[in-house]
Image (cartoon, coloured by chain):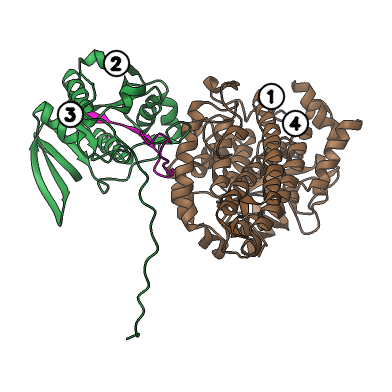
Chain colours: A brown, B green
């Protein structure tokens, strides 16, 4: 399996198979939580509400209990304040601390560094519950499940000891900076770079659309290290702390959705970084690290997109059963019923593929998890489903659906970005196609 | 320090569920309905665990009388921090007819058998709203009772309990062993963390039947009919001059 995955990544990137160091990030999964198919569990379509606890064969009773806890927490502690955060454009830092206190941050981190070494399925539960609760912020999954794994997968011992516990407590909010004003999908076209000066690195450049950018205490910055070779062979990831001289944050960018998440431009003006700021021991390994971690980011977008779509569906089902028109509820009209029928069908199909991908990610844990191809298909199809569902659910809410006080309007706006971020869906098609005709 | 506490955890229809009366009007629909731990029992569990964390209590035992699924409720109590569970399995018709009168006798037997110093129960369960089990358990055991507790403090060999009574708060002293029932403001129950959920999997739950405790649970009352609450009627408008 290892060579297979390595080969696939390698082929895509045109780098030799042996150069791809397969991540060890999933090897900390709880051994007694190895994937088991629990055949006696119902599928989502059988549940009274698609989000009801107790469905899906990939989960166990323990996951249900954790889901119960997470559901309660998000609904009681986050949801009531969320509308205010959307207006403020950011979530207060205390909320991160609260999440840390209750053990909801970085749950898959190794026990050696203060983590609890939870399995990937528990992380999935957290991702889903946050979106089932219509809490699109804070983006703790970015900090905990994308940024943090870079540190525990590739970091030096010093970096791990220094940063991991602070991520877990919510004292450090993490972010990762890839996109630039002139390089998004074309990540190899980035210009941010570092130049060696004695033992230090001096960084110059800028980044844009950086989630958690305003709040971030630590940013993983993708930069060119060696301009004499192809970008893929000369990139590095740097751990840049927020108070480093020369590093400034721009304004909180105004977006059409996901308004509780802060999104920023970052500027690096002769930022002097010590040798220890380079992630890992080796130079020029940045591109490979990114390529190893990107599939799970896309899987995450699919998992959350599916979860949010289910929430939108249930929100709409509730609405059409209450709203009266022509002397009856909307739910009595066949045209409405058929729309719901179509949506439920697609949602059940979507969940089936998402669950297959989650399972694949678990099964292939030892070789780095889900591959680019599958993750891209999940991201592509689910995010487009999400936008279809968002459009139709808003439509079924009529004029009220267009009002911001109705959560469906915000969900509609939140959904738009999903076909763009974590690799645009045009890029997803490229990745999927490459494997078909290779 | 060597105290042992028994907490009662009842599995009830979740507070957020809209309860529906069965077509035969002999009860409410429970099949396929979300259940969870009685919220007042969550407060009881929390209080017991806090006593354990303060090292006043050595062991917390959670007990539930009910169908197989009651084990999930016990598991939740274990995930919150209880040490072990006792499930007294009562199903079908017997469970439908089970009343505080019966449960209190079972709880009293267990309290004796486990040699506990304190029984902490919710002041009532949100399904039956009986508010009887705690009082009856104290009576069966012939122990002092401190009901509707909003604060519990250990005082040498006694407990100082603040009770929520009509019109204010009452502070009483009770000698141990005693039965306490919890009111809403006693504490805010914790969220079970993932490590504790994993640990709970390994904690023992003893499976028992009513026969083990030699308690007669034959019905003492008969349900004649269960009705929906009356639908709220429109109010009448009072038309008059504005002041």
C-alpha distance separating marks 4 and 3? 55 Å
Dot 4 and dot 3 within a common chain? no
**Can residue B126 be found in the magenta stretch?**
no
Q: Which mark is residue B209?
A: 2
Closer to the eye: label 1 or 2 = 2
Residue bearing the label numbered 3: B1
C-alpha distance separating marks 2 and 4? 52 Å
Question: What residue is shown at x 56% (from left), y 35% (from top)?
Answer: A47
In this view, the residue in front, A138 or A135, is: A135
Look at the numbered discs 4 and 1 and tell me whether their residues touch, using CB distance below 8 Å: yes
Q: Is residue A240 visible?
A: no
Whether residue A398 sits left or right of residue B136 in the image: it is right
Residue bearing the label numbered 4: A371
Chain of the residue under the numbered disc 2 shown in the image: B
Task: Residue A355: give x, y in percent of width and height.
Answer: 66, 31
Chain of the residue under the numbered disc 4 shown in the image: A
Task: Residue A316: give x, y in percent of width and height.
Answer: 61, 51
Q: Residues within 10 Å of mark 4 (few under 14, many from 20)?
A: many
Chain of the residue under the numbered disc 1 shown in the image: A
Residue bearing the label numbered 1: A364
Q: Residues within 10 Å of mark 2 (few under 14, many from 20)?
A: some
**Extent of the magenta region:** B1-26
Question: In this rendering, is residue A330 above or below A153?
Answer: below
In this view, the residue in front, A394 or A420, is: A394
Which quadrant of the figure contains the N terminus of chain A? top right
Q: Which mark is residue B81?
A: none
């Amino acid at each position: 399996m290892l060579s297979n995955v390595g080969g696939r990544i390698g082929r895509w990137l045109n780098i030799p198979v042996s150069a791809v160091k397969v991540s060890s990030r999933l090897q900390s999964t709880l051994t007694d939580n190895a994937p088991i198919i629990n055949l006696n569990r119902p599928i989502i379509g059988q549940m009274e509400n698609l989000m009801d606890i107790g469905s899906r064969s990939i989960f166990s009773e323990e996951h249900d209990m954790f889901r119960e806890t997470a559901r309660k927490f998000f609904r009681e502690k986050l949801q009531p304040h969320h509308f205010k955060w959307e207006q403020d454009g950011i979530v207060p830092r205390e909320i991160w601390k609260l999440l840390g206190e209750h053990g909801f941050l970085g749950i898959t981190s190794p026990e050696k560094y203060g983590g609890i070494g939870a399995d990937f399925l528990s992380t999935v539960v957290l991702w889903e519950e946050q979106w089932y609760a219509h809490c699109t912020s804070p983006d703790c999954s970015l900090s905990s499940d994308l940024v943090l794994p870079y540190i525990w997968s590739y970091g030096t011992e010093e970096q791990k000891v220094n940063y991991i516990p602070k991520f877990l407590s919510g004292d450090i909010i993490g972010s990762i900076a890839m996109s630039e004003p002139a390089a998004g999908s074309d990540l190899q076209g980035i210009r941010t770079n570092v130049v060696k000066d004695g033992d230090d690195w001096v960084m110059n450049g800028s980044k844009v659309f950086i989630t958690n950018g305003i709040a971030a205490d630590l940013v993983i910055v993708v930069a060119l290290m060696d301009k004499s070779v192809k970008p893929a062979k000369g990139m590095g990831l740097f751990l840049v702390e927020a108070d480093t001289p020369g590093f400034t944050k721009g304004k909180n960018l105004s977006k059409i959705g996901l308004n509780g998440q802060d999104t920023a431009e970052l500027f690096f003006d002769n930022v002097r970084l010590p040798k220890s700021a380079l992630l890992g021991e080796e130079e020029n390994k940045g591109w490979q690290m990114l390529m190893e971690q990107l599939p799970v980011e896309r899987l995450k977008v699919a998992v959350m997109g599916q979860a949010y779509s289910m929430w939108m569906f249930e929100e709409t089902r509730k609405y059409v059963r209450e709203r009266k028109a022509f002397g009856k509820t909307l739910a009595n009209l066949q045209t409405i019923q058929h729309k719901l029928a179509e949506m439920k069908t697609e949602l059940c199909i979507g969940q089936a593929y998402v669950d297959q991908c989650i399972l694949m990610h678990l099964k292939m844990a030892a070789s780095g998890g889900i591959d680019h191809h599958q993750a891209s298909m999940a991201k592509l199809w689910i995010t487009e489903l999400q936008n279809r569902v968002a459009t139709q659910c808003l439509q079924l809410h009529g004029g009220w659906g267009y009002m911001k006080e109705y959560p469906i309007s915000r969900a509609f706006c939140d959904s738009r970005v999903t076909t763009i971020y974590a690799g645009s869906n045009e890029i997803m098609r490229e990745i999927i196609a490459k494997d078909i005709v290779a | 320090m060597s105290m042992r506490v028994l907490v009662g955890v009842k599995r009830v229809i979740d507070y957020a569920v809209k309860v529906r009366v069965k077509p035969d009007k002999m009860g409410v629909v429970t099949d396929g309905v979300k259940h969870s731990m009685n919220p007042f029992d969550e407060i009881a569990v929390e209080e017991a665990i806090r006593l354990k964390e303060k090292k006043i209590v050595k062991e917390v035992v959670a007990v539930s009388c009910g169908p197989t699924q009651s084990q999930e409720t016990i598991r939740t109590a274990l995930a919150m921090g209880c040490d072990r569970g006792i499930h007294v399995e009562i199903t079908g018709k017997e469970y439908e007819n089970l009343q505080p009168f019966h449960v209190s006798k079972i709880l009293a037997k267990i309290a004796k058998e486990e040699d506990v110093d304190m029984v902490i129960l919710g002041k009532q369960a949100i399904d039956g709203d009986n508010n009887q089990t705690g009082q009856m358990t104290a009576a069966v055991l012939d122990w002092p009772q401190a009901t509707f507790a909003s604060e519990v403090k250990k005082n040498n060999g006694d407990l100082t309990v603040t009770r929520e009574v009509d019109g204010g708060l009452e502070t009483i002293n009770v000698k141990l062993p005693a039965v306490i029932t919890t009111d809403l403001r006693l504490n805010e129950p914790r969220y079970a963390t993932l490590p504790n959920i994993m640990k709970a999997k390994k904690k023992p739950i003893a499976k028992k039947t009513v026969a083990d405790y030699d308690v007669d649970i034959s019905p003492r009352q008969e349900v004649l009919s269960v009705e929906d609450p009356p639908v709220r009627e429109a109010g009448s408008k009072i038309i008059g001059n504005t002041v």
